Structure formats: C-alpha cells, structure tokens
Amino acid sequence: MEKKTIEKQTVLMYSTTTTLATLMSDAGEIPREIESKARELGLEITAPPVWQYVGVDGKPDTRFNMDICLPVNGAKGNAGKFRFVELPEINCITEIHKGSWYKLADTYNQVFGEMSRKGIVPAGASREVYHTCDFENEANNVTEIQVIIQ
C-alpha cells in the first residue's frame, strides 16, 4: 500500500450507472469501442485504461457511477457517444492486484482495512488502472487500485 498523487490527465470517457453484479455486462464492448474511437480520431493513447467508480459500497445490487476512461494526448474531433474529460489530480492510496478480477474485492478489503487502521479517510471514489489485461490467463492480469482519499 502506497500513498500517491496522480496527475491530471485528458481521457476519452464513457459514463454509465451499474452494479457490482452487472458491471461486466454493462461495460460490454465499450473498452474496445473507446480504443477504436481514439484510433479513428488519430489520438495517441498515453496510458493504460482507467475505470473510475463513485458510490460503490461493496454490495452487489447497489447502483453506482462508472466511468470507462482511455488516457489520450488531447481532445480533438467528434467523440461520438464518448466525451473528452480532464480527470483531476488526485491523492490516493494504491495497491497492485495481480490475478483474476474476480478477486479484486479481496485486495480492496485489505486496502480499506489498512486505511482504517491508519486513520486514512476515503473520499468515496476509486480508480482501477489496467496495466496488463490477459483474458486467456487471468493470472497475468495486473491492476492498480487507486482509492481516492480526502
């Protein structure tokens, strides 16, 4: 667990509401479509995909806001069903999760437990940065969890 400041970044974003139970089906093909749109617009992808969550409480049926973001080198062209946004600079607690996304909750529980023990207050939002995505061998996935703090 590490405290970091993440600089602001321009992203191509898709926003929706979802639940933990329906997150993957609600996301559907959006990650592929957003990358395709960035390439169509001639944008350089500057960092791994970032998914931002606001209002998650750990319960499978609670609705929350989800932003699927792709960092790009600028905002130009018609984004279609996506939009250009500048994600603000954040202070966060980070932890690297290696392996299946179905076990992300275990890592989140460890992070929130450690934050509680140290008196660090979460701000109600988090991000996941997908450094390595391997859909054939989930053990190879590398996801950086960023819990935004006050």
Image (cartoon, rainbow, N blue to C red):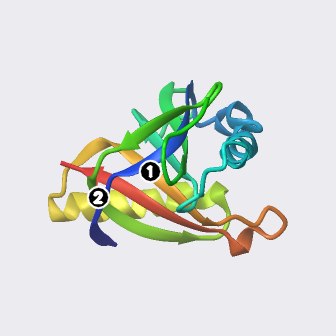
Quadrant of the rendered image containing residue 14: top right
Side of 76 where 95 appears, left or right:
left
Vertical comparison of 100 with 98: above or below: above
Vertical comparison of 108 with 126: above or below: below
- Rendered location of residue 25, percent (x, y): 74, 34
Q: Amino acid at mark 1?
A: Arg
**Residue 43: numbered disc:** none
| CB within 8 Å, label 1 to label 2 | yes
Q: Which residue is tagged 2?
A: 92
Quarter occupied by the N terminus: bottom left
User: Which residue is rendered at x = 68% and y = 63% of the image?
Assistant: 100
- Local crowd size for mark 2, using a 10 Å CA cut-off: few (<14), some (14–19), many (≥20): many
User: Which residue is rendered at x = 51% and y = 24% of the image?
Assistant: 63
Query: Camera-side residue: 150 or 131?
Result: 131
Quadrant of the rendered image containing residue 116: bottom left
Dot placed on the residue nearer the N-terminal end, 1 or 2: 2
Q: Which residue is tagged 1?
A: 127
